[in-house]
Structures are given as C-alpha cells and as structure tokens.
Image: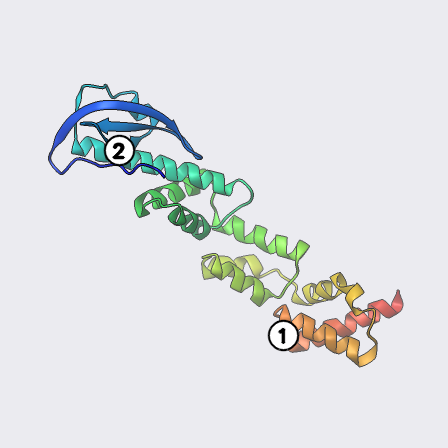
Amino acid sequence: MEQKPHPLSDGLEGQITDIVMEKTATMKRAAIFVDGRLAVYARLGDAERLVVGHTITDHALAELQRRYHHMGAYIQAVRYLGPRDRSALEVQQHLSTKGWDAEANHQAVERLKQEGYVDDRVFSQKWVDYRRRTAPRSRMAIIQELKRKGIARATIQSAVEALDEEALALECAIRKSRQWLRYVGYEKEQRIVLFLQRKGFPYALCRKAARAFINLAQND
C-alpha cells in the first residue's frame, strides 16, 4: 500500500531529510521527507531543485503537491485516451476513480482540450460513425448514449442530424439476415420488427424496414 504523506501544519517549516526517487504505474516521482516523515510527492523536475538539509515551508510543500497532482492527473488521462477517443466527462470520471482531486482533474481535462486530445464535437461525430459502421441503431439510441457520455445537447444534434434512420434500420436487419432464415411470411416480418424496436427505432419505421428487407431477400 502506498505510503500516505504527512504535510506540515500551516505556517510551519521543517528540514528536508531525504529525497527518494520512485516509479509508479503512471509516472516517475520523488518522495520528499521532512523531519524524517514523508511530507509530499513531487515531480522530478521540482525535486531536482530541493536540497537535503535545507528547510522548506508548508506553503512550498503545498505548491509541490499541487504541481505533482496536476502532472499526475494529466499523465493518467493521456494513458486513458490511448485505446480510443473519450468524451470530457469520461476522462473526468476516470480521473476521479483514480483518486485525483477536483482541481487536478479539471486542469488535466482543460489542458487536453487545448491540445486537441479531448474534443466532444469530434468525439460525437466519431461515435456516430462508429455506430453506423459496426452496430447500427436508432437515432434516439445514439442520442441517449452520447447523453450518458456527457455530451451537450447542441453537439449531439449536430452529430446525428445527417443520420438516415431508414437506412440504419434496414442495415440492422441485413446484419442479422441469417437469424431470419428459419422464418417466413408474417412471422419473419414480426420478428424483424420486434428486433428493430429493441434497437430503438419507431414502430412505423420498423415495419417499413422489415418489408424492405424481405423484398430484398426475395429478389436475391
């Protein structure tokens, strides 16, 4: 278990008794010991300016901690973004679960936005494209997914406005074409309709897509 720092009380100062370099799963850091006790973790660049035997104030330690948290949260966020794009809310929630404080969390996300690594508009469009290519579903279902990811309403509307729901519903049915082979007539149509309704499509559109699929299958 990670050792918990014991910072100085307000207005006090102490002597730096040791500086120990460490490596965690996310970053390299320095453990700063004051008066024989772990007082704070610091970034390596900040620790290089410290000298064992010198005194340090509680305010200086607090600043070391703030800078360490900002960098640590940022590095944690970058690692989280590695596999795929994320919304700003997803990054914030991830950092919170990893124990980073609210200020460090906010600063990390804002920096990633400025650098272009977090952009909810780009994320939303990529999410819509991904759903359209790999797992078609209704416009409403996609809207609900993006809402859960913290995307603003106007951004969501912009991302989904070009969706052709009729084409999406038909694509959903086509992707499951083997599932409908055992059925015929009304039963086939009804099963396709129920399947598309579970994907969030409105009933009338489900009927239209089911009939279009059956016509396509008959013409093949």
Going by the image, does 182 lie left or right of 98? Answer: right
For the residue carrying disc 1, how many other residues have a C-alpha within 10 Å: few (<14), some (14-19), or many (20+)? some
User: Is 167 above or below relative to 62?
Assistant: below
User: Is 62 above or below relative to 181?
Assistant: above
Q: Nearer the viewer, residue 13 or 144?
A: 13
- Residue 33: give x, y in percent of width and height: 24, 28
- Residue 169: give x, y in percent of width and height: 69, 67
Q: Estimate the spatial distance between the alpha carbons at disc 1 and disc 2, rounded to whole Å.
A: 57 Å
| Residue at x 44% of width, y 49% of height | 88
Residue sitting farthest toward the left: 11
- Residue 74: give x, y in percent of width and height: 40, 38
Identify residue for label 1: 202
The three-letter code of the residue at mark 1 reads Pro
Q: Foreground mark, 1 or 2?
A: 2
The numbered mark, 1 or 2, whose residue comes first in the sequence reads: 2
Quadrant in which the C terminus is drawn: bottom right
Residue sitting farthest toward the front: 1
Visible residue check, residue 208? no
Q: Secondary structure at mark 1?
A: loop
| Residue at x 46% of width, y 61% of height | 153
| Residue at x 54% of width, y 63% of height | 143
User: Is 50 above or below relative to 7?
Assistant: above
Going by the image, does 208 lie left or right of 109? Answer: right
Quadrant in which the N terminus is drawn: top left
Q: Secondary structure at mark 2?
A: strand
Residue 40, label in figure = 2
| Residue at x 26% of width, y 28% of height | 32
The three-letter code of the residue at mark 2 reads Val
